[in-house]
Image: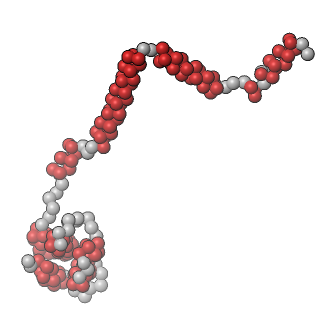
């Protein structure tokens, strides 16, 4: 086989798609050349310029890190105006005296269901403050009973209040039943 024939065979082999280089290989070759050129350029720099370049790179990197940290802190910080407006618009925490007065007014108006709920919240608020528990008006009745220690009297009071507020088996669901509930609540209202 002559040298010309060998070249033709070699070209035919390298023209095969198996040996065709794709863009990733070309990019890797280009990056390799660029890296070697950068290393060569850095080797040719005088020491002073090499150190100055290193310090400049460190300063840029430090600035980038600082900017990222500051941006993250700003992003995660609560919005002060939202906190102020939420505090201004929020209703003040009710007092047990206000809830008792509301229960009496509602009962006088014949709205016994609402009166029983207000009375129940007044009792829970008094007991929570005695145990130094934070008031949470969104808690369910039985959550308060469990949180306040499940006294048998409190369980009976809660069952009676729920029977008036939500209906249930009762022989007397009128004002007399509410007055009985009010008398039961009175034992917790004394200091």
Left or right: 24 as drawn, with respect to 189: right
Left or right: 32 as drawn, with respect to 86: right
Residue 107 lies in what quarter of the image? bottom left
Residue that appears at 52% across and 17% down: 40
How many numbered circles does the render carry?
Answer: 0
Name the outermost residue toward the front. Answer: 47
Q: Nearer the viewer, residue 131 or 111?
A: 131
Q: Is residue 96 visible in the rendered structure shown here?
A: yes
Left or right: 79 as drawn, with respect to 189: right
Name the outermost residue toward the left. Answer: 191
Residue 79 lies in what quarter of the image? top left
Residue that appears at 51% across and 20% down: 39
Image vertical order of residue 65 relative to residue 186, above or below:
above
Left or right: 20 as drawn, with respect to 76: right
Query: Residue 141: image x %, image y %?
Result: 27, 73
Q: Nearer the viewer, residue 21 or 164?
A: 21
The structure's colour scheme is secondary structure
Name the image quarter holding the N terminus: top right
Residue that appears at 26% across and 80% down: 150
Residue that appears at 49% across and 17% down: 43
Query: Residue 50: image x %, image y %?
Result: 41, 19
Query: Residue 29: image x %, image y %?
Result: 61, 22
Name the image quarter holding the C terminus: bottom left
Image vertical order of residue 167 relative to residue 1, above or below:
below
Residue 76 lies in what quarter of the image? top left
Query: Residue 87: image x %, image y %?
Result: 17, 51
Q: Nearer the viewer, residue 189 or 56?
A: 56
Q: Is residue 164 visible in the rendered structure shown here?
A: no
Image vertical order of residue 27 relative to residue 95, above or below:
above
């Amino acid at each position: 086989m002559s040298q010309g024939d060998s070249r033709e065979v070699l070209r035919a082999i390298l023209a095969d798609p198996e040996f065709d280089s794709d863009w990733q290989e070309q990019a890797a070759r280009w990056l390799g050349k660029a890296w070697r050129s950068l290393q060569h350029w850095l080797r040719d720099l005088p020491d002073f310029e090499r150190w100055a370049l290193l310090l400049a790179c460190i300063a840029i990197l430090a600035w980038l890190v600082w900017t990222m940290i500051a941006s993250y802190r700003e992003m995660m910080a609560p919005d002060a105006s939202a906190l102020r407006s939420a505090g201004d618009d929020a209703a003040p925490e009710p007092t047990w005296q206000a809830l008792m007065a509301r229960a009496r007014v509602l009962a006088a108006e014949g709205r016994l269901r609402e009166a029983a709920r207000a009375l129940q919240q007044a009792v829970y608020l008094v007991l929570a403050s005695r145990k130094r528990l934070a008031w949470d008006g969104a808690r369910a009745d039985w959550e308060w009973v469990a949180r306040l220690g499940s006294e048998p009297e409190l369980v009976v009071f809660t069952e009676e209040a729920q029977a008036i507020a939500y209906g249930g088996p009762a022989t007397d669901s009128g004002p007399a039943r509410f007055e009985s509930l009010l008398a039961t609540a009175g034992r917790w209202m004394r200091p």
